[in-house]
């Protein structure tokens, strides 16, 4: 799994474009209660989102809480070995809600932690 983003900051508002990739292999799941013969060898998800964040400025503090939302699209392969109607993958809506904090290392550099 992995991803990346790039964006632009305007005062207390930030906007970014984010790409994510993840893959779950059947052999990575242990102890699950499913029939392995009906499950595909792997499931892949690729998504692209546009996110908007609001930084909640606290005066004279190097830590800034933030909240954000994102919308976009996702490509997902079916988790079934034999797809219904031969549809092995599908595009769909993707969305997320984010929150976290940033730390001012310098006025130009910030570290972010969030979910």
Image: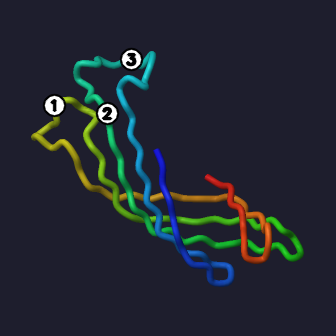
Name above or below for residue 68 compared with residue 84.
Answer: below
**Among the two numbered marks 1 and 3 on one chain, the one whose residue lies closer to the N terminus:** 3
Left or right: 48 with respect to 85? right
In terms of secondary structure, where does tag 2 sit? strand
Q: For the point 43% across and 60% down, which residue is it? A: 19
| Tag 1 and tag 2, C-beta contact below 8 Å | no
Q: For the point 38% across and 17% down, which residue is it? A: 33
Measured in 3D between alpha carbons, the distance from the residue under mark 1 to the one under mark 3, in whole angstroms, is: 19 Å
Residue located farthest toward the left when viewing the structure as drawn: 85
Task: Tell which tag, 2 or 3, sits nearer the viewer.
Answer: 2
Name above or below for residue 1 compared with residue 104.
Answer: above
Measured in 3D between alpha carbons, the distance from the residue under mark 1 to the one under mark 2, in whole angstroms, is: 13 Å
Classed neighbour count for the residue bearing mark 1: other residues with Cα under 10 Å, few (<14), some (14–19), many (≥20) = some
* Residue to which mark 1 is pinned: 82
Q: Quadrant of residue 36?
A: top left
Name above or below for residue 71 compared with residue 114.
Answer: below
Measured in 3D between alpha carbons, the distance from the residue under mark 2 to the one under mark 3, in whole angstroms, is: 17 Å
* Residue to which mark 3 is pinned: 33
Classed neighbour count for the residue bearing mark 3: other residues with Cα under 10 Å, few (<14), some (14–19), many (≥20) = few
* Residue to which mark 2 is pinned: 42
Q: For the point 27% across and 26% down, which residue is it? A: 39
Q: For the point 86% across and 76% down, which residue is it? A: 59
**Among the two numbered marks 2 and 3 on one chain, the one whose residue lies closer to the N terminus:** 3
């Amino acid at each position: 799994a992995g991803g990346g983003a790039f964006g632009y900051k305007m005062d207390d508002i930030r906007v970014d474009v984010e790409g994510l990739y993840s893959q779950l292999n059947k052999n990575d799941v242990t102890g699950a209660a499913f029939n392995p013969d009906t499950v595909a060898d792997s499931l892949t998800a690729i998504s692209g989102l546009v996110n908007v964040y609001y930084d909640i400025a606290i005066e004279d503090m190097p830590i800034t809480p933030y909240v954000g939302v994102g919308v976009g699209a996702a490509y997902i392969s079916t988790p079934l070995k034999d797809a219904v109607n031969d549809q092995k993958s599908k595009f769909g809506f993707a969305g997320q809600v984010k929150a976290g904090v940033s730390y001012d290392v310098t006025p130009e550099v910030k570290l972010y932690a969030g979910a």
